[in-house]
Amino acid sequence: MYIVVIGGGKVGYYLAKALLQDGHELLVVEKDQRKCEAIAEELGQVVLQGDGCEVATLEQAGVGRAGVLIAVTGDDEDNLVACQVAKRRFQVPRTIARINNPKNEAIFKKLGIDVTVSSTDLILAQIEQEIPTHSLVHLLTLKGVGVGIVEMRLPPDSPALGRPLKDLGIPDESILSLVIRQGKAIIPYGNTVLEAEDEVLAVTTPQDEPALRRILLGQAPSQ
């Protein structure tokens, strides 16, 4: 099946990698030239630089013959527009959109998007389950992708406290996706400052997990 992925960030990259491993024909559409170059270097010539919301770009990508279009940019509006153009202009049978704000889910479905995926809802569903009280717990391993979702509760002596995330040196292949503070969910950004007892959920690779643990917990990984 030919699949077009809109968005070449970390989500788009790992998604593309997994789909290629499953034998699908695939093209990633990404605006940023540096991201395009990185994807081409890692995955081959499966990336097109351009705006996935524009008809001309989607036409160049051959969306008309795609079985699925998946929009996973960090902007809900872009994801919605890309899916709508694919559906209405190119009659793509199935569209899937990443939603960063769960409140947008109803709107997306009313506007004809076939499938919506909210990372926040997925993570919160994991939190609602019984989680062991260890400081670092694997919640989910993504099949075939080599990354997992882990949960950490920051101790009072964490070296990460009081500093914005952008200054912590988080590994490139790790994403802090959610912070739970006093029962409230916070979507972290570069200027977010962590506090003691914050519960942090992160997507990371096995290779980067020890470094992430040292940065956030100030501990070497246990054997």
Image: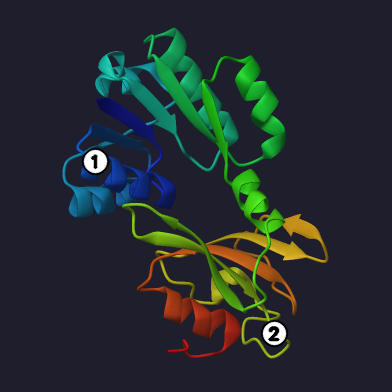
Left or right placement of residue 102 versus residue 92 in this view = right
Task: Identify the residue at the far right of this view.
Answer: 182
| Residue at x-position 32% and y-position 20% | 67
Q: Position of residue 80 (x, y in %)?
A: 54, 25
- Whether tag 2 and tag 1 are in contact, CB under 8 A, the answer is no
**Residue at label 2?**
155
Q: Identify which amino acid the numbered label 2 is placed on.
A: Pro
Q: Earlier in the sequence, mark 2 or mark 1?
A: 1
Q: Quadrant of the N terminus?
A: top left
Q: Identify which amino acid the numbered label 1 is placed on.
A: Asp
Choose mark 2 or mark 1, whichever is in front: 1
**Residue at label 1?**
22
Q: Quadrant of the C terminus?
A: bottom left
Characterize the local packing of mark 2: few (<14), some (14-19) or many (20 or more) Cα atoms within 10 angstroms.
some
Q: Position of residue 220 (x, y in %)?
A: 48, 90
Left or right placement of residue 123 versus residue 146 in this view = right
Rendered position, 109 above or below 199: above
The kind of secondary structure element at disc 1 is: loop
Q: Nearer the viewer, residue 79 or 211?
A: 211
Q: Nearer the viewer, residue 204 or 74?
A: 204
Q: Nearer the viewer, residue 125 or 216?
A: 125
Question: What is the spatial separation of the Cα atoms under label 2 and label 1, in whole angstroms?
Answer: 40 Å
